[in-house]
Image (cartoon, rainbow, N blue to C red):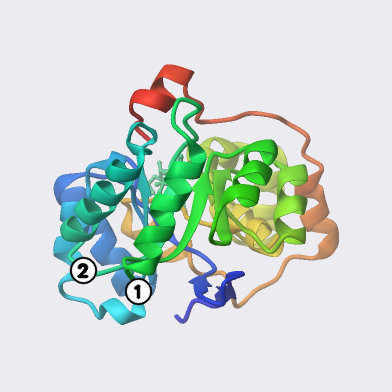
Amino acid sequence: MKIKDRKLKNGEKIPEIGFGTWNLAGKTVRQSVEEALEAGYNHIDTAEGYSNESEIGEVLKNYDRSKLFLTSKVLPSNLNYENVINSCKKSLEKLNTSYLDLYLIHWPNPAISLRETLWAMNSLYEKNLVKSIGVSNFSLYQLKIAQKISPLPLTVNQVEFHPWWNQNKLLDYCLDNDIVLTAAAPLARTEVLSDKTIIQLSTKYDKTPAQIVLKWELAKKIIPIPKSSTKEHIRQNIKIYDWDMSAEDLKLIDNIGRKKQVYQLSIDDEVYGISD
Ligand SMILES: NC(=O)c1ccc[n+]([C@@H]2O[C@H](COP(=O)([O-])OP(=O)(O)OC[C@H]3O[C@@H](n4cnc5c(N)ncnc54)[C@H](OP(=O)(O)O)[C@@H]3O)[C@@H](O)[C@H]2O)c1
């Protein structure tokens, strides 16, 4: 199973599906990440806020780092210059690696200068500690501001995206500006898997509801990062290449029209700490 790459605007490559690790800890995260790497995933998404980087780092010791794409994120409470540098260095140490492929601002924090944060990320890049930088949970407006003041190209915006939270305006802007939209909670934490249209298409194509949703996201040029601690799910979520969905059926998912977010934090959570 070879996962295809997409190109980031700075020329680096990113595997078009990744493995999410939010809320996986201890033995479960070790087993799940190992299972994912054995199944063929080569792109792992974590964050300092997930408190699982050390466990992931233990697993990574047994794999060829050069073949992996690792993303981590800096907490919104750590966005001043010194803290960004220190957070990144701690993530590198825990993950047993000398560089991150992608480093993201996990959430915007209006209390800390975004310019300062982005300059700190630039310094990490200049020291070869990160290959690409980006943002997460940035609205269209926040993304446009960040682009204007970032010394480096912002390659990714990781946001909630699934058939019930179809952020088309943001996606169109990202596609027009060569920014990759990564779908956090691409399965809407399972909620969307019981949607009537998804179930109908699952029956029609003889695929699981999760595969239908992931296929739709890939067709929209989004990079999904599904999380699973179930071996069968981990494996089925990357069986995405030997079948296709028709344009009409993809459109049916576009038109579901239901609006539901599965993760959203209060401003206090955004600034002082996060769980996802
Ligand atoms: N940047 C951010 O602020 C942010 C926010 C949220 C998420 N994320 C990232 O995005 C990743 C994914 O999001 P998420 O973990 O919130 O949720 P998700 O991937 O949308 O859903 C995970 C849930 O789906 C289930 N599942 C996975 N594959 C399945 C399948 N084939 N059939 C049925 N159920 C399946 C999992 O259960 P099993 O374990 O039983 O498979 C788990 O309960 C996170 O882990 C994290 O890396 C980032």
Image location (x, y in percent) of residue 157: 57, 50
Place residue 83 in its image quadrant. Answer: top left
- Work out whether residue 131 or residue 46 is closer to the camera in this orientation and state it: 131
Q: Of label 2 and label 1, which has the lower sequence position?
A: 2
**x and y percentages locating residue 208 in the rendered image:** 56, 55
Q: Which disc number belongs to residue 60?
A: 2
Q: Is residue 20 left or right of residue 162?
A: left
Q: Are the two marked residues, 2 and 1, in contact with CB atoms closer than 8 angstroms?
A: yes
Which image quadrant for residue 129? Answer: bottom left
For the N terminus, give its image quadrant.
Answer: bottom left
- Give the answer, above or below, for where 120 lies relative to 236: above
Type of the residue with mark 2: Leu
Q: Position of residue 197 (x, y in %)?
A: 73, 43
The residue located at (29%, 73%) in the rendering is 38
Pointer 1 residue: 68
- How packed mark 2 is, by other alpha carbons closer than 10 Å (few <14, some 14-19, many 20 or more), is some
